């Protein structure tokens, strides 16, 4: 088993040598020459040249366990409900990470897992569906008495000069000692080819907690005066009471710099999020127990391919990716011949009437992982 561990995406991911995309705009556009505008790209396969050495599962997981400041503990330890809610807003912002234009993570295979511990926080992800590609995340921290449950999948569509990926699914952060559940969604990912290539998070995010009666509306990549496009990394919004709609805090800033809240009652401005503290200097996950690594682990499933991409051996990369894909097709044929359907190992997963998905962890607690974030 070859486990290949890659460093987390840094704040300045576009300039990172390992993940920086070569000048591939013409090649990228050529990929979509036979794709109609408005087409769903969920099943679209990229050649290895357009991948960077990570699975989507790893990227989702890193947004939870790779963090420079202990924002989760702050969520739990704040005494007032408003302070806890504001801390959750800051943590929600921290899960938005840099995107590198021109390259993308691997599409996880069915049953792929990613299991990592960071201190007392244990995180487990599983790919619970392949069509559509649904990823589930469960994280628990017994010390802080909190739990995270995500179920999400991206629906990318091609619009001629851009691709927009709507990230569907529900995200929950549970502060168990406070008996509070915070629900939130994810912004959309916008990838532009013309006139200026780039990738940014855009759209609206709502965070709400029924138990303390508070909500937040955040707008990523907000428009400026007269409706013109403003700073694409900006965040504007508010924190307010659910029952009265009374605004308590105004929120503004940039998710790649700082985000502040302004107390409406007294005008006081406070920085609640500093991207340099949260996303800079992140440490690469290390192997603590190689024998404990599952065969379904992302870093093992894609180990040969990641190694080839990092060494820019594209012939080897194509062969490694082909081996993984052919193995999956073979397993699918075998299941179909036996009349079997895939059942996730760590989650129950069901599609809902509105076309969304609901994922629930089977275990109450996530066990410590064989892969760990070094102190």
Image: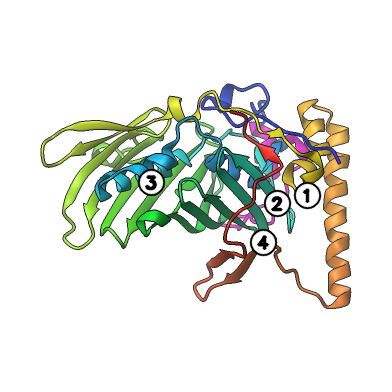
Mark 4 or mark 1: whose residue is earlier in sequence: 1
User: Which is more N-terminal, label 3 or label 4?
Assistant: 3
* Label whose residue precedes the other's in the sequence (1 or 3): 3
- What residue is at 62 percent from the left and 29 percent from the top? 374
**Cα distance between the residues tagged 1 and 2:** 8 Å
- Are the two marked residues, 1 and 2, in contact with CB atoms closer than 8 angstroms? yes
User: Quadrant location of residue 256?
Assistant: top left
Residue sitting nearer the eye, 261 or 289:
289
- 1 and 3 marks in contact (CB < 8 Å): no
Q: CA distance from mark 4 to mark 3?
A: 26 Å
Q: Is residue 73 left or right of residue 368?
A: left
Question: Which of the numbered marks, if any, corresponds to residue 113?
Answer: 2
- Residue 17 lies left or right of residue 81; in this view the side is right
Q: How far is mark 2 from mark 3, CA to CA?
A: 28 Å
Magenta-colored span:
25-49
Disc 2, SS: strand
Q: Position of residue 186 (x, y in %)?
A: 46, 50
Would residue 323 be found to the left or right of residue 163 on screen?
A: right
Q: Residues within 10 Å of mark 3 (few under 14, many from 20)?
A: many
Structural distance between the alpha carbons of marks 2 and 4: 9 Å
Tell me which residue sits at (57%, 65%) in the image: 359
Q: Position of residue 243 (x, y in %)?
A: 19, 63
Q: Which residue is mark 4?
A: 346
The answer to whether 151 is drawn above or below residue 33 in the figure is below
- Mark 1 or 3: in front is 3
- State how far apart marks 1 and 3 are (Cα): 32 Å
In-front residue for pair 323/199: 323
Evaluate if marks 2 and 4 touch, with contact meaning CB atoms under 8 Å apart.
Answer: yes
Left/right of residue 259 with respect to residue 374 in the rendered view: left
Q: Which residue is label 1 attached to?
A: 294
| Residue 258 falls within the magenta-colored stretch | no
């Amino acid at each position: 088993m070859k486990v290949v561990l890659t460093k987390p995406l840094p704040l300045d991911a576009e300039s990172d040598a390992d993940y920086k995309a070569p000048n591939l705009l013409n090649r990228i556009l050529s990929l979509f020459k036979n794709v109609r505008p408005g087409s769903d790209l969920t099943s679209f396969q990229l050649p290895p040249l357009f991948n960077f050495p990570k699975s989507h599962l790893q990227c989702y997981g890193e947004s939870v366990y790779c963090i420079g400041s202990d924002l989760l503990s702050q969520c739990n330890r704040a005494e007032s409900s408003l302070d806890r809610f504001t801390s959750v807003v800051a943590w929600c912002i921290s899960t938005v990470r840099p995107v590198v234009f021109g390259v993308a993570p691997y599409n996880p295979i069915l049953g792929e897992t990613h299991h990592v511990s960071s201190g007392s926080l244990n995180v487990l992800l599983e790919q619970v569906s392949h069509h559509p590609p649904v990823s589930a995340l469960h994280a628990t921290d017994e010390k802080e008495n909190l739990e995270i449950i995500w179920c999400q999948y991206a629906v990318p569509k091609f619009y001629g000069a851009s691709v927009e990926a709507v990230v569907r699914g529900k995200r929950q952060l549970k502060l168990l000692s406070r008996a509070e559940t915070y629900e939130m969604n994810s912004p959309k990912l916008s990838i532009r080819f013309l006139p200026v290539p780039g990738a940014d998070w855009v759209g609206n995010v709502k965070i709400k907690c029924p138990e303390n009666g508070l909500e937040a509306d955040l707008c990523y990549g907000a428009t400026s005066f007269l409706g013109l496009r403003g700073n694409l990394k900006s965040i504007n919004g508010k924190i307010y009471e659910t029952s009265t709609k009374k605004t308590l805090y105004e929120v503004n800033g940039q998710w790649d710099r700082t985000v502040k809240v302004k107390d409406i009652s007294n005008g006081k401005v406070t920085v609640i999020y500093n991207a340099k503290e949260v996303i800079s200097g992140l440490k690469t996950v290390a192997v603590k127990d190689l024998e404990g690594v599952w065969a379904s682990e992302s870093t093992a499933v894609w180990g040969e391919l990641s190694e080839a991409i990092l060494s820019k051996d594209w012939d080897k990369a194509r062969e490694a990716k082909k081996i993984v894909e052919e193995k999956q097709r073979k397993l699918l044929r075998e299941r179909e011949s036996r009349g079997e359907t895939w059942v996730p190992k760590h989650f129950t997963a069901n599609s809902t009437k509105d076309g969304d998905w609901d994922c629930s962890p089977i275990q109450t607690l996530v066990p410590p992982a064989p892969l760990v974030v070094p102190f």
